[in-house]
Amino acid sequence: MTAKHWSPPRLSLRFLHVWRRNLLVWRTLAIPSMLGNLADPLLYMFGLGYGLGRMLEDVGGMSYIAFLAAGVICSSTMMSASFEAMYSAFSRMHVQKTWDALLNAPLTLDDVLLGELVWAASKSFLSGSAVLIVAAALGLVPSTLAIVVIPLIFLTGLAFAGLGLIMTALSPSYDFFMYYFTLCVTPMMLLCGVFFPLHELPAPAQLLAQALPLTHAVALARPLVNGTVPPAWLLHIAVLAAYAAGSAYIALALTRRRLLQ
Amino acid sequence: MNPRVNPISPLIATGLRKSYGANEVVCGVDLALQPGECFGLLGPNGAGKTTTLRLCLGLTAPDGGSISVLGHDVPQEGREARQRIGVVPQFDNLDPDFTIRENLRVFGRYFDIDNATLRARIPALLEFAGLSSRADTRIQTLSGGMKRRLTLARALINDPELLFLDEPTTGLDPQARHVIWERLRNLLKQGKTLLLTTHFMEEAERLCSRIAIMDHGKIITRGEPRALIAQHVEPHVVEVYGEGVQEWAKACGRRHAERCEATGETLFCYTRDPAPLIADLDSRGDLRYLHRRANIEDVFLKLTGRDLRD
Ligand SMILES: Nc1ncnc2c1ncn2[C@@H]1O[C@H](COP(=O)(O)OP(=O)(O)OP(=O)(O)O)[C@@H](O)[C@H]1O
Ligand SMILES: [Mg+2]
């Protein structure tokens, strides 16, 4: 890595061309893709929510399924952003060489990366919002404050899209992404308060969880869905924003090194 | 380099250098294109042709030298330069998720071309590519030649003044190749400037007004194709094949030809006067031979050698 790879991103609105190209491709597959994206989170919500929920009085002052709903909104956003920023972006970068075509046009790699980042966040935004809508339809969202969760979903998507793009910049093949899922995504699913309250964990694990972005997404979403603003809201937003900006910058430098040699 | 470079030269590169690790793959390349010409960059695998084009497009920064494309300093103003260049890359990167027409439309939008202009241009480009009747099929169903024609049409979507063509006909059958050549001549007639890389010497001879032969990152010779042939090789070539060709070379070939090169069972005799060779071969009758005029390939092989590069 040289200083040139770390030069500040040169942002331009041309990134919208990349975003729009991906949207056009997705549009033709929108319905099956949306349903596929909803299946997983809903299985979690109903399977665990009703199955496990029967054995539990309430969790954190609400029914278990309502507790779960806020967590699953966040985890589904994480999953969707990660998949798009890794498997799909890698296929456009490395397999189909779509990025090469974009770079022969008057776009720069900075435009391409920003386009992919915002696209992956947009797609995950749809997944997270769909879960929120289903939860609301089931009466699991008691407060209109839940509206605030919508931009939060997008921010969460940006954070995980950035992390995914780092993996894509480093990846020699699709198989590489399994490590990230096994070592990062699955532990976050389990440690960040999606399925049970954080304070049930031993102290060192709680400390670790505080460093992970999903923890902060859940810590915001759950109270908001239930009508209260968490006291540390600014901190949670700052952590997510730092993850989004930091990971996007690292991904950009790594991708420049990979493609602009 | 010519110090009196044409001020409106569409591409001027001086002293280009590029290294990958310890491997210097472009070592001091100078290029200056004339408006409206087809300039051929020839060279064996790994010579540095694609890297030179990538440098001129601003896709990678040179370690040394300067590049000016259509008046823009590259790579600093690479985006502005690419706005006015068309690129046919060495490997097709058409969008498999779109139809033929969508490929053109989506690519056109990358140049900020408005919809009305695109609607007007696309039918003409489909016509140019001979793909009008299949405009709404996906690109997976296309043959190699069709894909290449579509890639060429796509490169024209911004009505570029300058085109970079990286091996536009590699992998195509003769019919498809001739169609591409015909299209390229068409573009020259319209006044566009072409920078072409190729392995096909025939292609270079047919299309290019000037060529440069590149090897190991350096341009080893340049000029008009005919002038290069006259300068570097004898005008006649007699290729002789068959068993016993080595003995024949000693007995006759090397005596009558100015220069002989052997590869396996084939002997290439370069000469000003082929008559004695042919007379001798005709009288023997056991060796097959081909008599032809020297071409750019002979120049190329003389200068870059006959060894494999991969
Ligand atoms: N990104 C890269 N990293 C390291 N080495 C590279 C890179 N790109 C090209 N090279 C090396 O630079 C040399 C020149 O490559 P280049 O692709 O420019 O050759 P070429 O003349 O286009 O060859 P071909 O006819 O095979 O397309 C080769 O040895 C290649 O391996
Ligand atoms: Mg090449």
Image: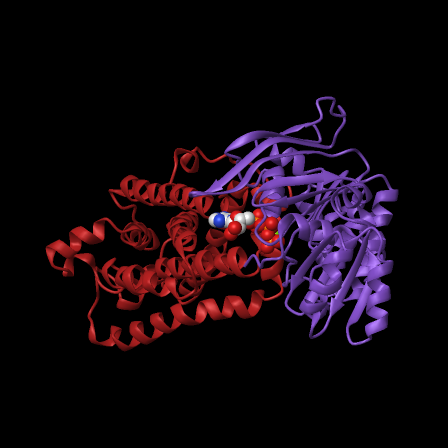
Chain colours: A red, B purple
Q: Position of residue A180 (x, y in %)?
A: 33, 60
Taking depth in this image into account, of B124 and B144 the one nearest to the observer is: B144
Q: Residue furthest left?
A: A203
State the image quarter where residue A16 is shown.
top right
Taking depth in this image into account, of B309 and A79 the one nearest to the observer is: B309
- In this rendering, the answer to whether B81 lies above or below B120 is above
Instruction: Give the residue at x 36% y 57%.
Output: A74
Q: Is residue B9 left or right of residue B282?
A: left
- In this rendering, the answer to whether B298 lies above or below B79 is below
- In this rendering, the answer to whether B8 lies above or below A151 is above
Q: Position of residue B42 (x, y in %)?
A: 68, 48
Labels in figure, total: 0
Taking depth in this image into account, of B251 and B77 the one nearest to the observer is: B251
State the image quarter where residue B266 is shown.
bottom right
Taking depth in this image into account, of B8 and A91 the one nearest to the observer is: B8
The answer to whether residue B166 is visible is no
Q: Quadrant of the N terminus of chain A?
A: top left
Q: Position of residue B110 (x, y in %)?
A: 66, 45
State the image quarter where residue A85 is shown.
bottom left
Q: Is residue B122 left or right of residue A33?
A: right
Instruction: Give the residue at x 62% y 65%.
Output: A28
The answer to whether residue A156 is visible is yes
Instruction: Give the residue at x 69% y 73%.
Output: B244
Q: Position of residue B123 (x, y in %)?
A: 84, 54
Q: Is residue B246 left or right of residue A39?
A: right
